[in-house]
Amino acid sequence: MQISRRVFLRAAAAAGAVAGLPGAARAAEGGAALFKTQLCKALIAPAADDAACERIVQAGFPGVELNKKDVTPAQAAQGRLTAEKHGLKIHSFMGGWAEFNHADPAARRASIEDVKRMIRVTAAYGASTMLLVPCRVGGGGLALPKPSQFKIDFDPRTLLVGSVVEGDNAPFAAYIAAQNRATELSRQAVEELIPVAAREGVVICLENVWNNLWVLPPFAAAFVRSFDNVWVKAYFDLGNHVRYAPVETWLQTLGHTVAKLHIKDFKIDRTANNDGKFVKIGDGSIDWKSVRQAIDAIGYNGWVTIESGDFTDAEHSALMDRFFAGQGA
């Protein structure tokens, strides 16, 4: 297959450009002396209108991640112009949940086609990445291990799971089958999406968000790396999966597959439903000083988008500055 010069140049730049950092971005005061890596803070908003852009910039954020799904490429192009007018960078679009493992083939096809649309929307925004959760399993009485029970044995070549806990796996046979089906169908769907992403210059960032799939670092990393493609990376949320493994372990294992980061906090309580709950950043089980060091250790330079509603915009901005500088949250 002959590759166009445009696609070739986009692919060559993807690894370095995926962060989408603006030229003026810099580490928080004092951070440059402590860390080799450069982080840039962003908020989440539905769309890039004048009110949202002005609010975000006034709070000290140079970037935004948008999450309104029913947007046309033309509307996204206008949003990009609005953001640029305010000096704000749209760095990513939250495509969110797909249904690549739906029981109905027609529904699976509709989901794939909708993600193609959202990739085009992402490109029109001028964003470098689109967050994608391929699918989920659970409900309907499906028995799953508790987060602390998981010990997944999977084939590194096929990614098929043989067991999910030590000892007797019979209670989880249906879950293992659902996991394997989700992996196979998700891989097929993402493979179909890669040419669209390459053409539009958008990196597909896979995230697993409490969807009961790829829940341990080695398995999640193997899933992302299985595509062996510059247009497929990981979107890692620093708070979503601490109940399965320490954040530092997740970062070390995902390594250079990480294209973007979210930040929130989670308090582990193994006696509680879901093994804990989301809390204000700084009140949970995450050691934010250690996590900043782990980010530096994997060489991640890029955007960190705060996904928490517990503070004002200005308080979120100050919190991010402390975190970036290695002072905790």
Image (cartoon, helix red, strand yellow):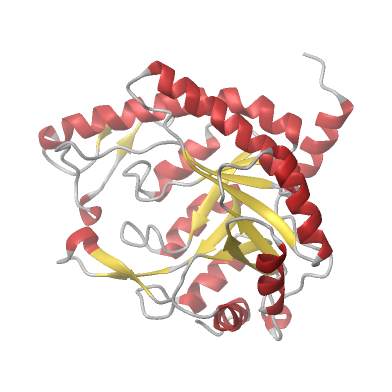
Judge by depth and name the residue closer to the eye, 286 or 293. Answer: 286
**Residue pushed farthest top?**
1
**Residue 143, quarter of the rendered image:** top left
> Does residue 260 show up?
yes
Q: x%, y% of residue 35?
A: 67, 75
At which x and y percent is residue 124? 75, 42
Residue drawn at x 37%, y 80% as measured from the top left: 283
Relative placement, left or right, of 97 versus 229 is: left
State the residue in front, 169 or 2. 2
Q: Residue 231: x and y, percent? A: 66, 37
Residue in the image at 35% along x and 50% along y: 210
Q: Residue at x 40, y 59 (%)?
A: 240
Numbered-mark total: 0
Residue drawn at x 75%, y 38% is 201
Tell me the quarter of the picture where residue 81 sits.
bottom right
* Res 137 quadrant in image: top left
Tell me residue 286's x, y (percent): 40, 73
Q: Is residue 126 left or right of residue 159?
A: right
- Judge from the rendering whether residue 290 lies leftward or rightward of residue 266; answer left or right: right
- Vertical side of 150 occupied by 36: above or below: below
Q: In the image, is 272 to the left or to the right of 18?
A: left
Q: Residue furthest right?
A: 5
